[in-house]
Image: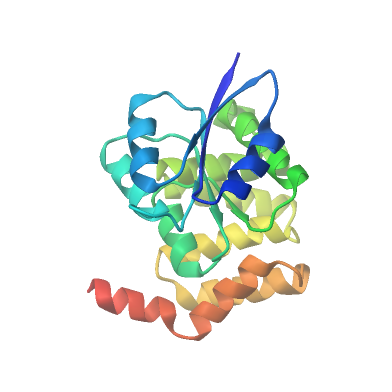
Amino acid sequence: MMKKILIVDDAQNIRITLKRCLSSEENELDVAMNGEEAFAKIMENDYDLVFLDLQLPAMSGIEVLRKLRYEGNHVNVVIITAYGTVENAVEAMKLGAIDFVQKPFSPGEIRRVVSAVWARSSISESQLKSFEDFLEFSKQRIMEGDYEKAEGSLRKALTLNPGDAEANYYQGLLFESKGETEKAKETYRKVLKLQPSYSQAEENLNHLLSGGSEIRRDEEE
């Protein structure tokens, strides 16, 4: 069955790169160059997946996500960003983003993300057996806002593979989404010990250490 994918980025080179990565007989590709255009297209079309840049003109990627969820639209969204701060990551996760891709990215990374999205969309809880199953299921539950099930499946994933950097990274994001800042810091430090090159974990930890998360919560209060 043909999969419909929307690419949302104001940079032409990124749109071209993603189209090359995703071009196949199985994919029907569409593009949008700003947030307002993206929101309108998503509401009018039945996309299977959206690659959404955070830094967009007219309407930010976060605002697009917020409006979609308000309207009850739970399309699969993968965030594209050069700004991997915990504030953006946690906010996007709360709004149901299922994965993150940082610029610059490789074609292989994009294809792996897409394959994982298609795989997790067909997983039911009763079928979960492997580490990969539990991790992908937890990402799907995060997208739907079901954090209790996300935490449960992520715990099982970490029981099977406690040394996996990605699973620990998502554990850190869940801690941060609940305001458990110290646990999030500890978890991001663990991720960096497991994989020193995990740039998102490093940026998130630095943001927390600078007090950015606490400031954001104070502003919300």
**Residue 134 placed where, x, y %?**
63, 42
Q: For the view shown, which residue lies furthest in the front direction?
A: 12
In terms of image quadrants, where is residue 114? top right
Q: For the view shown, which residue lies furthest in the top direction?
A: 1
At a point 26% along the width and 37% down the height, the residue shown is: 71
**62 to 108, vertically: above or below:** below
Q: Is residue 215 visible?
A: yes
Q: Quadrant of the N terminus?
A: top right
Q: Quadrant of the C terminus?
A: bottom left
**Residue 125 placed where, x, y %?**
56, 32
In terms of image quadrants, where is residue 158? bottom right
In this view, the residue in front, 44 or 187, is: 44
Answer with left or right where residue 199 lies relative to residue 153: right
**31 to 28, vertically: above or below:** below
At a point 58% along the width and 39% down the height, the residue shown is: 137
In this picture the colour scheme is rainbow
**105 to 98, vertically: above or below:** below
